[in-house]
Image: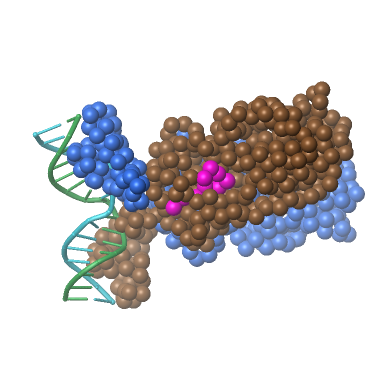
Chain colours: A brown, B blue, C green, D cyan
Amino acid sequence: MEPSADSKRATLAQVAELAGVSVMTASYTYNQPDRVSDRARSKVLDAAARLGYAGPDPSARSLRRGSTRTLGVVMGEHLSYAFEDPEAVSFLAGIADVCAERGYGMTILPITGDADDVPRITAAAVDGFIVWTTSDDDPVLAAVQAMKRPAVVHGGPAVRGMGLVGIDNRAAAHAVGAVAFADARRPAVVSFPLSRERVSTIVGGAGLADVLFPVTRERLAGYRQAAEDAGIAWRDVVVAVCARNDAAEAERVVATMLASAEPPDAIAAMSDQQAAGAVNAIRAAGLVIPDDVAVTGWDDAAVAAELGLTTVAQSLREQGAACAHAALGGNPDSQTAPWSVVRRTSTRR
Amino acid sequence: MEPSADSKRATLAQVAELAGVSVMTASYTYNQPDRVSDRARSKVLDAAARLGYAGPDPSARSLRRGSTRTLGVVMGEHLSYAFEDPEAVSFLAGIADVCAERGYGMTILPITGDADDVPRITAAAVDGFIVWTTSDDDPVLAAVQAMKRPAVVHGGPAVRGMGLVGIDNRAAAHAVGAVAFADARRPAVVSFPLSRERVSTIVGGAGLADVLFPVTRERLAGYRQAAEDAGIAWRDVVVAVCARNDAAEAERVVATMLASAEPPDAIAAMSDQQAAGAVNAIRAAGLVIPDDVAVTGWDDAAVAAELGLTTVAQSLREQGAACAHAALGGNPDSQTAPWSVVRRTSTRR
DNA sequence: CTGTTAGCGCTTTCAT
DNA sequence: ATGAAAGCGCTAACAG
């Protein structure tokens, strides 16, 4: 076996010695090649090849430079679940675009909801943090804040010293709710969970106690306004809180609502996945969209176009990119992203 | 403003000094709390709180310990594209499961296809690497190998000194191809790209020159066997190579094939997304599945069940987890994962 | 239970 | 163009 196949990593000092130059010349060869003579450079690269030296040790370099060239992304309770959420996935893609362009790595920080989340944040070797939408009381926020690095929250909550990127959820919900609830007498809402406990329930609007996820809270407030604009009291609006953001649970819960004594004739959901589940349940019940029941989604995902869903369009990908820029320390660190209501055939207007 | 709001990070030495103890006592407080008296510990934590000290610096710790507690995931050419591929996403979720469980971070390494990919690998502060399926000639493989850390490739190619996790693609393709091509006279294949150039073409099986992606190569070999078992020469099998793994491109290419003089009567695809595109094209052409054209997919994604697609089931999630274990240095580092053919209504048998 | 010493591998600073 | 010295912040190893 040649020396290059040696299974231990060599150090810069060893390379320098074998090349017959000082450590600094070896270092310059990697960091400022122009500053080194051709002869010296090739001697160094030669020695490196012989020793199987792959370049300066990343940890040592980070320590010395005070920067890791890596961004940390904190992904709410269940990381594996985050990857199943198409919204979250395009958000990640937006971050990835910026990281790739700037030569940065991107560390995903798995948050489990357990006590060991905080140490994991604390132990993350990153230059900045991006926190995916979470609840007001998430201990992870304080942990990130304590790291004293550039940090942004997507969606919410707003935290002192951290940026905030997202849309005006209340305004968007009000707008799409107005379309969803047009000519409706019994509007209903299919909601994301209210707190990190993620319990499913069906309640009247008045029964909603503390909504700890700011995004959910704002959207509910917008839907409430829309309902009241349509002359319906919030306490008369049925809100179905789903533990997960998927079509299956939404389909079940909507089927239940449709089988009740006072079935809804308009349903505003919080994602296109949920809306798709609602569509399935409505069709299964032999009802017609939008005549019997109007439906709206959120995000304008592929499924929304396929099903003709009226929905709220926003670019999670661009918001991801904005977060990355903020976490890199550039840019004004907070920004409100654009949104629009896309009208299709699932609503009466 | 209190001192805790000070925007610069304090050091362990400063904490120790303020607490009136040695640096090591402070260090133990974070790393081996049991070894420290209650009094000393609380003095340290007190001082830390006052200085806004969030815990030992991750880079310094990594350097000293020689370990970063982070796994690197190398995601082929387009990272943003990787997140759009549901297969890749469940694979990531599997890695995430293991990382969360073991308290590890997970660094996604954005590979762009440019020359700066190698330096980015080289600069990654990780304890082990997981490489998502790539081509035989990908320079990233040598870069990872040079890092001399535990490494696994998912899918392929096999690399000396690195583990390999995946299914027997040839056998699986042979098996599902047998079902797809049953009673067919003009079988066709919808394929992934052949090389990292990702060019789209339609050729006879004999026209396939160098297939550089081992997974694609193996699947083509399996389909070939299946065709030949059915008495059809490989050169008579039309292979449509798609640049991207999505329904849209597959739909276009299948529409083209169906409009040709000798339209296929059986189509074996390489993903359920592609198969879904094929289904759309077939229906749009007014043909019946499986009577006029049989179709098979791959992966048993949600869409496969929805469309009644015969497909190959495998758990990318479990394979992701297996890769993570291997990259953590545990386990035998190579393993062949299970698969099965799921028969539904898109095929004649 | 606490402290001292040494040094992880590298790059910044300041010569030459 | 090259080099010597210093030290980034921390913890393993070894006393006391």
Quarter of the image where one finds residue C16:
bottom left
Residue interval drawn in magenta: A150-158
Q: In this image, B265 relative to B239: left or right?
A: right
Residue A138 appearing in the image: yes
Residue B89: horizontal and vertical position, in percent? 60, 45
Residue at image position (39%, 54%) is: A68
Residue B271: horizontal and vertical position, in percent? 70, 47
Residue B155: horizontal and vertical position, in percent? 57, 47
Above or below, B116 relative to A280: below
User: Looking at this view, is D13 or B7 the one in front?
Assistant: B7
User: Looking at this view, is A108 or A244 the one in front?
Assistant: A244
**Screen quadrant of the C terminus of chain B:** top right
Residue B163: horizontal and vertical position, in percent? 48, 45
User: Looking at this view, is A315 or A103 the one in front?
Assistant: A315
Q: In this image, B72 relative to B25: left or right?
A: right
Residue at image position (33%, 71%) is: A41
